[in-house]
Image (spheres, helix red, strand yellow):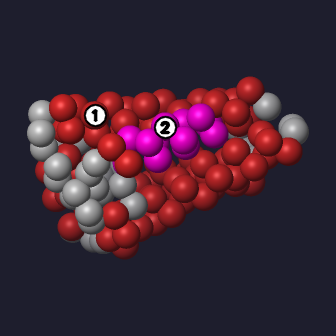
Amino acid sequence: MDTAGLIARVVVGVAFVVAGGSKLAMGAEWPAQAQSLGAPSWTIRPLPWIELILGAALVVGLGGPRVAGAALALLVAFTALLVDNLRRGRRPPCACFGAWSSAPIGWTHVARNAALAAAAAVAIAA
């Protein structure tokens, strides 16, 4: 793996570990914020654990391009949810990084996700 691929994989992995851990640290507040964003109810409880597992696998280099592809798929889904809310004029709190991201969603959240998605694509290609 080249240096850019390694850096991209670790950056996305760390972002996912922090996101999953901070959601779990919020306790009951995280599901309520996720619901206000319009996340499908069946995804809310397992999502932090999925983020932790994917993130840890990326950081340590397990699973190769498949894990990076799964992370990219989640980032695309997250971004679609953000864009849908913004297009409807809704700006609920961003539950992306638990208590660290309680500000209302905006286009900067979409840009952040696009940057992480680009990094995931680099990790896939590496």
Q: Quadrant of residue 39?
A: top left
- Residue 81, given in percent of the width and then of the height, sits at 28, 36
Label 1 neighbourhood size at 10 Å, few (<14), some (14-19), many (20+)? Answer: some
Count of numbered marks: 2
Q: Residue at x 38, y 41 (%)?
A: 110
Quadrant housing the N terminus: top right
Q: Secondary structure at mark 2?
A: helix
Span highlighted in magenta in the image:
109-120
Residue identified by numbered label 2: 114
Q: Amino acid at mark 2?
A: Ala
Q: In the figure, is residue 89 to the left or right of 33?
A: left
Quadrant housing the C terminus: top right
Q: Amino acid at mark 1?
A: Val
- Residue 67, given in percent of the width and then of the height, sits at 63, 36
Q: Is residue 110 above or below residue 53?
A: above
Cα distance between the residues tagged 2 and 1: 12 Å
Magenta span dominant secondary structure:
helix
Residue furthest top in the image? 125
Q: Is residue 110 magenta?
A: yes
Pick the residue in front: 18 or 86: 86
The circle on residue 83 is: 1
Q: Is residue 114 magenta?
A: yes
Q: Residue at x 60, y 58 (%)?
A: 14
Q: Residue at x 52, y 53 (%)?
A: 16
Q: Quadrant of residue 76?
A: top left
Pick the residue in front: 50 or 33: 33
Label 2 neighbourhood size at 10 Å, few (<14), some (14-19), many (20+)? Answer: some
Q: In the figure, is residue 45 to the left or right of 67?
A: left
Q: Secondary structure at mark 1?
A: helix
Q: Is residue 52 above or below residue 63?
A: below
